[in-house]
Image: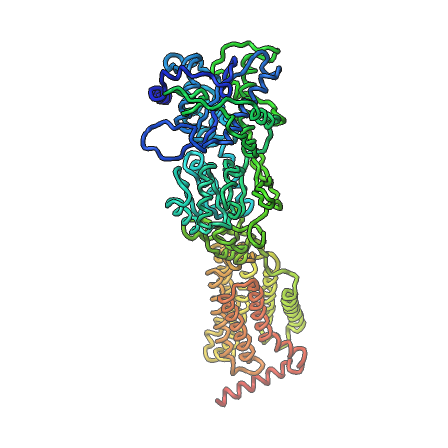
Amino acid sequence: MLLRGVHLLGLQLSLAVCWTPDCHRAETSPDFSLRGDYLLAGLFPLHSDCLQVRHRPQVTFCDRPGSFNGHGYHLFQAMRFAVEEINNATGLLPGVRLGYELYDVCSESANVYAALSLLSRPGTRHVEIGGDLSRYAPRVVAAIGPDTTDHAVTTAALLSPFLVPLISYEASSVALSTKRLYPSFLRTIPSDQHQVEVLVLLLQSFGWLWFSLVGSHGDYGQLGAQALEELATRRGLCVAFKGTVPASARAGDERMRDLMLRLARARTTVVVVFSGRQLAAVFFESVILADLTGKVWIGSEDWAISTYITRVPGIRGIGTVLGVAIKQRLIPGLREFEEAYARAEKGSPRPCPTGSFCTTNQLCRECHTFGEHEAPNLGAFSMSAAYNAYQAVYAVAHALHQLLGCSAGACSGDPVYPWQLLEQIYKVNFLLHEDTVAFDGNGGPLPSYDIIAWDWSGPQWTFRVVGSSTWSPVHLDLNKTKIQWHGRNKQVPTSVCTLDCREGHRRVVMGFHRCCFECVPCEAGTFLNKSDLHRCQPCGKEEWAPEGSQTCFPRTVVFLTWHGPVSWVLLAANTLLLLLLMGTAVLFAWHLNTPVVRSAGGRLCFLMLGSLAVGSCSLYGFFGEPTLPTCLLRQTLFSLGFAIFLSCLTIRSFQLVIIFKFSTKVPAFYHAWVQNHGAGLFVTVSSMAQLLICLTWLAVWTPLPARDYQRFPQLVVLECAHANSLGFLLAFTYNCLLSVGAFACSYLCKDLPANYNEAKCVTFSLLLNFVSWITFFTLASLYQGKHLPVVNVLAGLAGLSSSYGGYFLPKCYVILGRPELNNTQHFQASIQDYTRRGGSG
């Protein structure tokens, strides 16, 4: 209700300013008026608008010298032709005659006059604003026009309270789609929202991410430029510079010079000019004066194929001009209709009555027809706009056809209220010269554009259609080979702030524009997805990527396999050691009662060989993909087996010391040791202690199969988690203590009989064992590579081999190679010699 009140208040004020009693004396002009059962209003710019700034309200007369507008003339004739064609036909509105009232909307004041005039009651000059507006019947049932968005906004605001259909042929502003403000507005030209979509697609198709944008004063230029900037920004394009051509600008004035200076500083190759024809001409005149040439100029549909622009002196040298144009369509017979009109005899100009409006529905000082004008040339731009006006007339006629029930071959002739006609116009859907005419929910047509390129190759300017748009979804079809580019190399110009980064390099925005950036390589383990050029995305756990990559690669799963040269060598060595242990056990069993075997420990040797065999078998657990059983057993079995061997070695050396040194000196200790089976007790307690440590290790720091992703970026290492935990260190420390004990006891035996003195061999084997494990821990702390299990197996194999070689190989050599030394006499002689040396000492 508030909106309607504002509209009605505006009507009252307009009536007070514009209406005079002398208007009633105006006569009917056959050019601008045609009687009919239902009248249509036509609003056309027969004269150019006055762009000067006015500081007080005043009427702008249309018949200013040199202001005749050929483009508006073609629109004017298109409506007359459409009405005549419909009246002469018999199928669309049989028995009903359409009439029209045509107005010259050369200015805002003329536009307001036309809107108020068409709202008046038939036969009067009064607009009734009281009562039920749904029953109000103005002198016309619908209006066609006006041309510009600025005029259309005013007219639509005045007509909307009465719901008089207003179908514009050129007003494309998005603002007019707001049905809350302009419920009765429709159009046969696509909305600028669609044009903006096509312009952005055109920029994207050539990779022009960095461009300047110039709009013109008024709703068309400013709203269109704003919508283009918003959509371009969302699509990743950047507006380097945005300017506006003022309404009263003149080529070369201070404001235009400043605009040219800022445009030159932007240093963009591509400039989008979203402007009306008149201000676009001023802009390009300034471009030529500033010598700002050699660019790609992209035009909006209002000037892209207008000869009003191509006639600007020097326009040929500005560069490449591309643009968006309404789909080219022809009105069959319009050209002949205009020629016949121009040949007809017209009356001469005559003065208007003082203080009245002229009979041609114009705000003018003289009432004249078009006889004094030569018919202007009907170009492609004017034909497209004329076709839109032609479509609008037919849309009203088809709506009347449905409203009056003309389908049966005759029309009812009932009174028609504007709101009834508006409902039917929204429902029309028909073919007009093979083109579908229909309106969407916003009152707009099915969008269709051509992409054009200016062509100066011939003697005259022309344009080429190089592409078109389709809906929906919006899609652009371009034939880029048809475009003639300016410049020496005739190649597609580039227009970017920063060249694209190399593969695998992300963009780091510098400054305010996302199109200006530095290129930084993606870190190792990340990649650049083309969907987001500003952020490197991490690879998955099972993937890796080198620095500067645009894709991820599968990680290689590594573990100590059963096959492979290194594995074969290790397996062969360990198997050989195991066979030697088994062979030694058989050899010792065969010579169990010989002095060499008894001096080596007798049956205790089998426990020592078995413990070494257990340690050797545990090394097989390092091969193949880690499993729960192998993780639990491989290091614990080795630690336990080696502990048993060291315990036996220690107690065997300790017993020799007792026999040769303490049996006579401390006989009580010796007898207690023998009676209580001290050797077996020590081995049992020592082995149980290591077993307890290993069980605690498994319970608290359970080694489980795991996949290590941190050690190498390109590898997944299969290992046993917590394998080198505190439990492992405790077990290893215990074995070290046993090694020290064994070393100390063997050192005490250095002066025993030669057959019992093994200090050198045991010392050597223990030192080799120490070196192998020190080497392992050093490598493990410095190298965490995929070959660490190989180092672990080598260390274990070295420890086992040194222990076996240092203790058992000398005895095997005596048994097999020196049997003469393996007898009782030789051992007794050795003991007697030790006793003599001890007695003499």
Q: Which color mode does the image show?
A: rainbow
* Residue occupying the point 51% across, 79% down: 749
Depth order, front residue of 308/294:
308
Q: Identify which residue, 555 or 324, lies in the foreground.
A: 324
Q: Is residue 574 above or below residue 340?
A: below
Residue 412 in view (yes/no): yes
Whole-percent x, y for residue 35 in the image: 51, 14
Q: Is residue 820 above or below residue 424?
A: below
Res 607 quadrant in image: bottom right
**Foreground residue among 828 and 735:** 735
Q: In the rendering, at what x and y percent does residue 483 appear?
A: 59, 45
Taking the spot 56% from the left edge, 56% from the top edge, the residue there is 716
In the rendered structure, the answer to whether residue 611 lies left or right of residue 748 reads right
Considering the image in quadrants, where does the N terminus appear? top left
**Where residue 780 sits: x, y (%)?**
51, 66
Q: Position of residue 550 (x, y in %)?
A: 55, 53
- Rendered view: 273 above or below 775: above
Q: Is residue 402 above or below residue 510?
A: above
| Residue 703 appears in the picture as rendered | no
Residue lying at the far bottom of the rendered structure? 840
Q: In the current view of this chain or complex, which residue is farthest to the left?
A: 56
Question: Looking at the image, how many numbered discs can be counted on the residues?
Answer: 0
